[in-house]
Amino acid sequence: MKHTKIIDLLSGKGLLHEVKAKGWVKTFRNNQFIALNDGSTINNLQCVIDLDKFPAEQLKKIHTGAAISVRGTLIESKGAGQSVEIQVEHLKIYGEANPEEFPIQPKKHSLEFLRENAHLRIRTNVFGAIMRVRSTLAFAVHKYFQENGFFYFNAPIITGSDAEGAGEMFRVTALDLNNLPKDEEGKVDVREDFFGKTTNLTVSGQLEAETYAMALGSVYTFGPTFRAENSNTSRHLAEFWMIEPEVAFINLDENMDLAEDFIKYVIRYTLDKCKDDLVFLDKRLTEEEKNKPQAERSDMSLLNKLNFVLDNNFKRVSYTEAIDILKGSKPNRNKKFKYLIEDWGADLQSEHERYLVEKHFKCPVILFDYPADIKAFYMRMNEDGKTVRAMDILFPGIGEIVGGSQREERYDVLLEKIRTMGIDEKELWWYLDTRKFGTAPHSGFGLGFERLVLFVTGMTNIRDVIPFPRTPQNAEF
């Protein structure tokens, strides 16, 4: 007999019929009530055992974490907490879970403890909910772009160029590190390496995506990216997923429209599809907030925050205006900011971004027209000669969630910027070609997928929204 997913059984499918369910035991109470979960929903299915029908030796093997199969009649439940239950007639144990050894017991575990057991933390309600939300968000990303005429583009993982120009890249090599070939100057001879040149794991698929946008019109990437940035914070990962659309013939204003529309779509879709998980995460966050000092508590619940983003237009503010606001702000005047804002040209930190969103405007903010000196080489120079057509979207609790720009389409201007920033133009000959042959205005943005999941789930550490986090000094699992 084929088993039915618990999410379907809880909807009443199979009521008053014989059904089979398979899953993992969450709890086993009074040697009579099994709470069973198969991952399809955060809600458990109650399975009722008649003690007279099953040998005591078999029931002794049922503990939290055990994998079992049950077969019996699905009936309406008379007990509180569930609408249906199975009256178990047949029981099979696939795999036991010794309670003396299985670390995920039915009690509250710290998030740090669960990170140390990342291979098992998905068995908890919190991480089951997070990963179902993550999966739904990922599907919504593809759904949005496919419905809006974008083509999915697979950017290379191994690359010879540094899209951001920051140099924080993981080297890729097939050389024997204990016997490195040397050139005439005594340096490592990369010509002997697999690709015959220095290569790295990608930090962004943007540059390659631009080349495809200049033929297909609208493309997007959604894949893993890597940063060898030694930032051991709750907002940074060494390996993460990026969403990067690139669109020909649009300017920065249209790019901001696209980003706002996209974010609202994927949040709305996930709210609709993951109601039970988000209600659970909303309650979890409310409980967590109670443990914080009153001044640090959020004004809104998770669900209210998500709906607030959907119901309000993002506030668009120039960098120059933002600097004026920050310079005159109370935390800056009272020297409460870790990084004080003194002059125009400062590179905004997370504390500044969150002040603008959470304290000043109290809504998502899009900052635009940044100083050229603090932004990447590919961003279009404004007529003032000192700012570029860049934009960042700032979210409450997160800070920057999107970074984008109108790209510099003018060959001469782009070449000069590359040279000024000390980037090897020979490495980017193919990128410069797109400005020589049929160049056109175009724009795009990058959205760190984990930061989006962080916002939608209400979690506060980015290591808790990716299955196996990669951070400095940690590549476990």
Image (tube, rainbow, N blue to C red):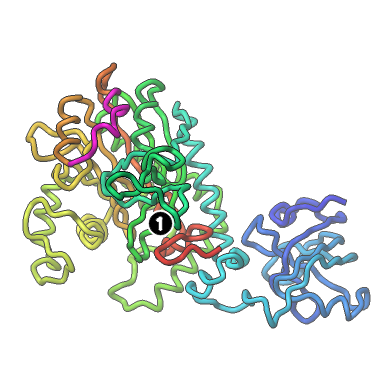
Quick check: 327 left or right of 436?
A: left
- Tell me if residue 30 can be seen: yes
Label the magenta part by its dominant secondary structure. helix
Quick check: 236 left or right of 339?
A: right
Image location of residue 244, percent across then percent down: 38, 39
Range of the magenta residues? 422-433
Q: Which residue is mark 1?
A: 238
Q: Nearer the viewer, residue 343 or 202?
A: 202
Which image quarter: residue 430? top left
Image location of residue 173, percent across then percent down: 44, 47
Look at 30% across and 44% down and name the residue there.
Answer: 184
Quick check: 472 left or right of 5?
A: left
Which image quarter: residue 358? bottom left
Image location of residue 408, percent across then percent down: 22, 30
Amino acid identity at mark 1: Ala
Look at 86% across and 61% down and name the residue there.
Answer: 71
Q: Secondary structure at mark 1?
A: loop
Q: Residues within 10 Å of mark 1 (few under 14, many from 20)?
A: many
Q: Is residue 430 magenta?
A: yes
Q: Nearer the viewer, residue 87 or 452?
A: 452
Q: Is residue 286 magenta?
A: no
